[in-house]
Image (cartoon, helix red, strand yellow):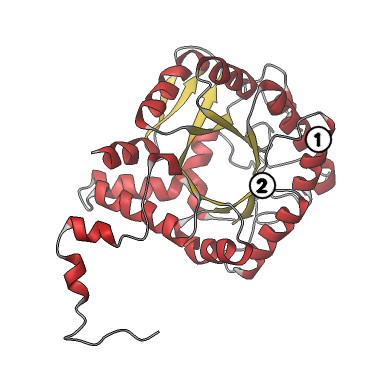
Amino acid sequence: MEYGKFPTYRPRRMRENETVRQFIRETELSAKDFIYPLFVKPGAGHHDEIPSMPGVFQVSLDLLMPEIDELLKLGVTSVLLFGLPASKDEVGSSAWGEHGVVQDAIRIIREQAPEMFVITDVCMCEYTDHGHCGKLDSDGYVNNDATLELLCNEAVSHAKAGAQMVAPSDMMDGRVGAIRKALDEAGFERIPIMSYSTKYASGFYGPFRDAADSAPAFGDRRAYQMDPANASEGVREACFDIAEGADMVMVKPALPYLDVLYRVKSETGFPTVAYNVSGEYSMVKAAAQNGWIDERRVVLELLTSIKRAGADMIITYHAKEAARWLAE
């Protein structure tokens, strides 16, 4: 396509003031675009700030509803729950307990704030005593097929408690199909799956592992999470999960993988989520606290970039402050 040439065509005419800029704005952010991650823990009276994530807290169940009420007042209507269990074991059995911390959190939110949409993270790393995302063989290798049963137990337990969507983040092969089958057989065929389909073995997860107490006791997760060098593989992973029954796919992290996000969305045409992860959040917070950046401007710019690249929804720890700024 050919456009006019200068001086006939002057693009700056359409940048003259905010009203005319709004006329041609291609990407609009809204509080409805955000999913807020929440860390719930046992006990009472806990509203513990995570040192590496200023403004983000681990919350006990008795203090959960003030968080939910604040989000709803800001127009953020979706949360993603992560649990810090009271106890851990080799296979993470507390992940599917009837009265596990996530299961009880689901019930509280559904009963007291039915307008809040509840998504649950499905993984074993918070619940195993070794911090890996599944059942280990004797040599320390995560046994893919043996782990699928554990993930199915967890997903079904969340659905029974009232979760409205489950989000497997473990990166085991075949887990979406296994969870879909388990949910259907348990009578939860209406519960959608948001798959962490394209999840990279990233250095940007460090603060999250403080938040969820989920750092591996040995080794790392490169044997099941993706190589940061690979983009086409990321698209294939999304396609595999779609074929197995995923209702939404995800790219995680967001900012270092905007090219992958664009490809996943454009090549699959499928509902796509991006996870603006803890390390991305903490870098912005650290720079802002040192006075190096304008936090408001940078946060809204980076969230706009994620949506512009193709995200239909954005999981972000910036959700509260971004929603406030967008409402100004």
Asked if residue 316 shows in the view, the reply is: no
Name the foreground residue: 27 vs 46. Answer: 27
Residue at figure coordinates x 81%, y 43% from the top left = 178
Which corner quadrant of the image does residue 146 belong to?
top right
Residue 137's disc is: none
Residue 184's disc is: 1
Name the foreground residue: 48 vs 302. Answer: 302
Placement of 194 over or under 58, stated as above or below: below
Which corner quadrant of the image does residue 20 belong to?
bottom left
Q: Position of residue 64 (x, y in %)?
A: 47, 19
- Residue that numbered label 2 is attached to: 247
Q: From the viewer's perspective, is 141 left or right of 219? A: right
Residue at figure coordinates x 32%, y 49% from the top left = 299
Q: CA distance from mark 1 to mark 2?
A: 14 Å
Q: Position of residue 29 (x, y in %)?
A: 37, 49
Q: Amino acid at mark 1?
A: Asp
Q: From the viewer's perspective, is 244 left or right of 87? A: right
